[in-house]
Image (cartoon, rainbow, N blue to C red):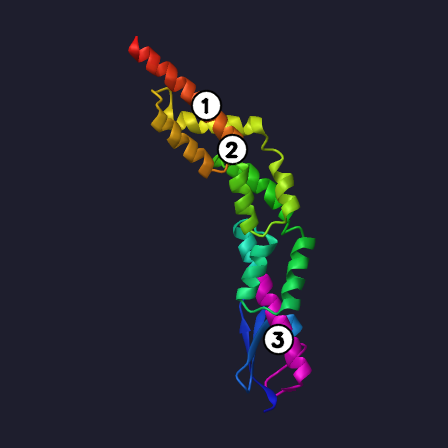
Amino acid sequence: MPNRIEEVKPRPRDRVTIRLSGGRFFTIPDEQTGGLSIGDTLSEEMVERLDRMDQYFRGRDKAMTMIARRARTRDEVRRMLDAMEISEPVRDGIIVELEELDLINDERFALEFVRLKADVRHLGPHRLRHDLGKLGIRREYIESALLALDSEQQQSMAWLLVERKLGTGRVDERSVRRIAGLLSRKGFDYEVVNRVAYELLQRAGRDSSAEEI
């Protein structure tokens, strides 16, 4: 069946949809149509070119919309483009372009992710390493971003959580176990969890002695 153009329909944002006799259609920028009009018969090479352009502009538009909402990792964009069935060469070209424009930057993403999650949710390095890994961030970027979370900063974050949970109230072994479990789930280093638990147990002992008096 010849690839004859049956419809050329203007779309928003200066785009045009070209529909072929076999039912296939492509939406590309008006400036890329090269004067194509209804009744023209296209070669297979031209159809493939229109297909690549359609994939490129659909994929790029979707990626730009994602990035406008919040920062995205390279892997997040790749998975989104794969879900759209964008071919590998077109997909990789879009990603490289976005990286060259500095719209995707996994190293910066890791740094900002660690700073935000540590400050707002008080997550420790083990949890942050796991979460960044799931987002497809390279290990060297993760480890570099986590350098800021030294033992001293983890101690400060851990005690902030203790104050929120316990305040200055009475401490007992049950509450210490609860706090230790919380800190472990949030991904703090084991030595930090153990240090906080030890100091809380010391406090619990002092509270018990005060009650006996």
The image shows residue 83, relative to residue 172, as above or below, that is: below
Q: Earlier in the sequence, mark 2 or mark 3?
A: 3
Measured from the top left, where is residue 67 in percent x and y?
56, 53
Looking at numbered disc 2 in the image, what kind of residue is underneath it? Tyr
Q: Label 2, secondary structure: give it.
A: helix
Name the residue at the left extreme.
Answer: 212
Q: Which mark is residue 198?
A: 1
Q: Earlier in the sequence, mark 3 or mark 1?
A: 3
Q: Neighbour class for label 1 at 10 Å: few (<14), some, many (≥20)?
A: some
Looking at numbered disc 3 in the image, what kind of residue is underneath it? Asp
Left or right: 190 in relation to 57: left
Measured from the top left, where is residue 94 in percent x and y?
64, 62
Which residue bears the numbered disc 3?
51
| Residue 138 seen by the camera | yes
Q: Nearer the viewer, residue 140 or 52?
A: 140
The image shows residue 30, relative to residue 20, as above or below, that is: above
Q: Nearer the viewer, residue 193 or 23?
A: 193
Q: Nearer the viewer, residue 63 or 30?
A: 63
Measured from the top left, where is residue 148 in percent x and y?
61, 33
Q: Quadrant of residue 87?
A: bottom right
Left or right: 205 in relation to 157: left
Q: Disc 2 or disc 3, which is closer to the eye?
A: 2
Q: Earlier in the sequence, mark 2 or mark 1?
A: 2
The secondary structure that most of the magenta stretch takes on is helix
| Residue 29 seen by the camera | no
Measured from the top left, where is residue 99 in percent x and y?
67, 54
